[in-house]
Image (spheres, rainbow, N blue to C red):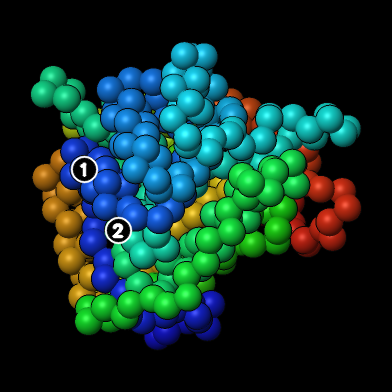
Amino acid sequence: MKKPSGLSGYKGGHYVELLRGGEPFFAAVEKIIDEARHFIHFQTYILDEDETGTRMVKALIRAAERGVRTYLLLDAYGTKYLSKDFIDSIENSGILFRFFSPTFTGKGFQLNLRLHSKVVLADGEAAIIGGMNFANRYHGSPRKKEWLDFAVLFRGPQCVHTLSILKRLWNKTFISKEERSQETVDTHLFYREDIRLKVLQNNWYRNKMEISKSYREIFRLAGSRIIIFNSYFLPAGNERKLMRNAGLRGVDISVVFSAESDAPVFKKATEFLYDFILKSRIRIYEYLPSNLHAKVATVDGMWCTVGSYNMNHLSDYASIEINVGILDDKFTKNFEKELTEIIRNDCREITLEEYSRRRRWYSQFAGWLSYQVLRLLMRITYQMTTKKSKPRISYTASDITR
């Protein structure tokens, strides 16, 4: 794959570490919180009031108690079951805490964007971005395997850009001057690993569609192979066409889904697309040990992406998503090797013959119905989250349907 024009703006000088779900991820988050000296931004979709969520909050409380300015932003829909006592313990500790956006605005019954990104930033020097929320199911236990997911820890110049994104999400007009985030990073270190990366956003309200565009670009220009792990996979018509074209021109594409999903309707709707995917010469694998929650891709051993973005209409137009795009041969090849090992050891391949054998009229109908319901709901969501004062971005009917 030649370097695509759509993958411009990647900065060198970074140290990057791949994190897999389970204890290594949560230990890494806790470590950068405990090492923070000046400020922390912690933003996520879900933080449960269980052992894992409580562990993260205790780390943030420790930081606040030693004088670190600590911002905690949780999505109002994703994290809606916290008890009053738990919230009081956060607010009384000195943590600057709020929920991101009620579900509906007061004007015209309009849906708000959801904060679906998962980011922790310490001192503008170290950041962790990925797909893991902060709950027991992402950590696992001796009796139950953690959900499969990934994140990256990075240090270097793009931490400055990450800080600007997080400040914009935190600093709303109703925040008092004393609560506003005004931190700046005047200098930043360049690391000898010199990995090039870029922090990418999807934020429909701000006309930021960087993650979606990066996927479309790599589908157009991939030369040999693509691996995609995606938990809630319902790409729009344009992306499906680009994937099919890549498969038909000989690019070896593997997509990996969960054998058993936490969202059965999404799973059935994705299965409805199996016939199209397989006939496009794209291989399908299903991950067996636990739920697959990952949202990652590698291309030609040179570019990869890790973050919160699912290939579906909700991530395009109804959620704030943040990914890290990495343009580095060594890192990507190592990541590709790990994904290939997961496919080999923990997945089953679904061939066209097997899919045809196991397909029954009632399962096909359930898939069709799930697909149509989700397509309708996503179309409604698109309409209800679009700001009428914003210029409309042109699209075709297939782009906003599933």
Q: Which mark is residue 401?
A: none
Secondary structure found at label 2:
strand
Identify the mark nearer the N-term, 1 or 2: 1
Residue 282: x and y in percent read 36, 56
Residue 178 as seen in the image, left or right of residue 339: right
| Number of residues whose C-alpha sits closer than 10 Å to that of mark 1, classed few (under 14), some (14–19) or many (20 or more) | few
Please report the residue visible at 52 percent of the width from the left and 14 percent of the height from the top.
Answer: 84
Asked if marks 1 and 2 touch (Cβ < 8 Å), the reply is no
In this rendering, the answer to whether 366 lies above or below 115 is above
Q: Which residue is mark 1?
A: 27
Q: Nearer the viewer, residue 288 or 134?
A: 134
Q: Which residue is mark 2?
A: 153
Secondary structure found at label 1:
helix
Residue 10 as seen in the image, left or right of residue 326: right
| Quadrant of image for the C terminus | top right
Please report the residue visible at 87 percent of the width from the left and 34 percent of the height from the top.
Answer: 107
On the image, which quarter does residue 148 sit in? top left
Number of marks: 2
Residue 37 as seen in the image, left or right of residue 166: left
Please report the residue visible at 16 percent of the width from the left and 41 percent of the height from the top.
Answer: 346
On the image, which quarter does residue 275 sit in? top left
Residue 140 as seen in the image, left or right of residue 323: left
Residue 23: x and y in percent read 19, 38
Residue 38 seen in this snapshot:
yes
Q: What type is the residue that disc 2 sits on?
A: Leu
| Number of residues whose C-alpha sits closer than 10 Å to that of mark 2, classed few (under 14), some (14–19) or many (20 or more) | many
| Quadrant of image for the N terminus | bottom left
Q: What type is the residue that disc 1 sits on?
A: Ala
On the image, which quarter does residue 93 sit in? top left
Please report the residue visible at 14 percent of the width from the left and 53 percent of the height from the top.
Answer: 341
